[in-house]
């Protein structure tokens, strides 16, 4: 894991914050890990002051917590965390829809359909590793058409979290096929400039994705608890 900050014009505390945030969200720094200031300052080639500032921001994000006699510890994502992240992300995406309908060009439609064409075979064979990033690229391209840059920046801030969990929803085969067909219908509505149908389908589409992810995470939690009980019973 390379946590050395890149050289740019950002303050060191911001670079440290972004590096640690990415490592925590992607699981490079697992839940329950201690972040020892001296160790991480050395690894990142920075002083402890900007590292402390970065850790305070991570605490406000709910990614780390200070525990008595343990110090700074990476928090595990709860189902409630994931539900809140999806709710925020989905609400923001819905705000972009009127502008997408207004601004979409034939070139935009072609780009969206090109992404969907790439997804066809991956969806058919269930190649989640290839399908998941393309599904996110489809939604990112769609929302970018709006040109609402302030909203888009906030959406991007949530997308890093969504990346970790979206593959869980896509992996469920019954939802995967339906979601892929909905993508095609969404593009058709954009091309037809039909805002009413676009908003109705998008609302259902992103809400189903959230629900599917939460169900999958709940099932995973129950499975882990059962395995732990089995081990303890040996």
Image (cartoon, rainbow, N blue to C red):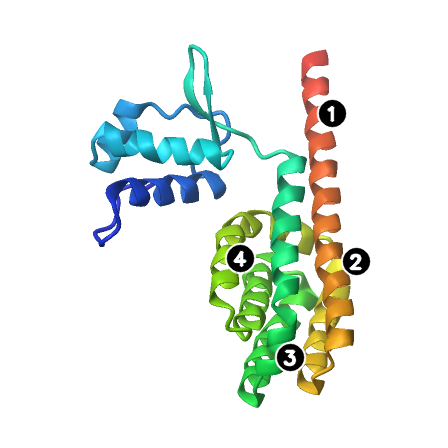
Q: Image quadrant for the N terminus?
A: top left
Residue 42 pos. (x, y %) = 22, 30
Closest to the observer, 178 or 38? 38
Residue 40 shows up from this direction: yes
* N-term-proximal mark, 4 vs 1: 4
Instruction: Judge whether 155 appears above or below 145 on screen.
Output: above
Q: What is the spatial separation of the Cα atoms under label 2 and label 4, in whole angstroms?
A: 27 Å
Q: Which residue is mark 3?
A: 101
* N-term-proximal mark, 2 vs 1: 2
- Horizontally, is 151 left or right of 9 in the view? right
- Horizontally, is 13 left or right of 202 in the view? left
Q: What is the spatial separation of the Cα atoms under label 3 and label 2, in whole angstroms?
A: 29 Å
Q: Which residue is mark 2?
A: 174
SS for tag 4?
helix
Instruction: Judge whether 105 appears above or below 197 on screen.
Output: below
Q: Which mark is on residue 155? A: 4
SS for tag 1?
helix
**Circles 3 and 2 in contact, beta carbons < 8 Å:** no
Residue 199 pos. (x, y %) = 73, 69
Tag 4: Cα neighbours inside 10 Å, few (<14), some, or many (≥20)? Answer: some
Q: What is the spatial separation of the Cα atoms under label 4 and label 3, in whole angstroms?
A: 18 Å
Instruction: Judge whether 38 appears above or below 128 on screen.
Output: above
* N-term-proximal mark, 4 vs 3: 3
């Amino acid at each position: 894991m390379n946590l050395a900050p890149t050289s740019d014009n950002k303050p060191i505390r911001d670079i440290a914050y972004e590096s640690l945030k990415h490592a925590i969200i992607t699981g490079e720094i697992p839940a329950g890990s201690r972040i020892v200031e001296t160790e991480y300052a050395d690894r990142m080639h920075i002083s402890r002051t900007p590292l402390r500032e970065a850790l305070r921001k991570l605490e406000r994000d709910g990614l780390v917590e200070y525990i008595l006699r343990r110090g700074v510890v990476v928090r595990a994502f709860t189902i409630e965390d994931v539900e809140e992240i999806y709710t925020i992300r989905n609400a923001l995406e819905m705000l972009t829809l009127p502008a997408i309908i207004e601004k979409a060009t034939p070139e935009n439609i072609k780009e969206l359909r090109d992404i969907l064409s790439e997804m066809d075979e991956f969806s058919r064979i269930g190649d989640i590793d290839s399908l998941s990033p393309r599904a996110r690229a489809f939604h990112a391209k769609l929302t970018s058409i709006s040109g609402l840059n302030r909203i888009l920046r906030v959406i991007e801030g949530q997308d890093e979290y969504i990346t970790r969990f979206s593959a869980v929803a896509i992996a469920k085969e019954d939802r995967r096929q339906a979601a892929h067909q909905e993508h095609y219908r969404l593009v058709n509505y954009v091309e037809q400039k039909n805002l009413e149908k676009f908003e109705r389908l998008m609302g259902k589409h992103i809400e189903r994705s959230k629900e599917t992810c939460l169900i999958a995470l709940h099932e995973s939690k129950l499975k882990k608890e059962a395995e732990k009980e089995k081990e303890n019973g040996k």
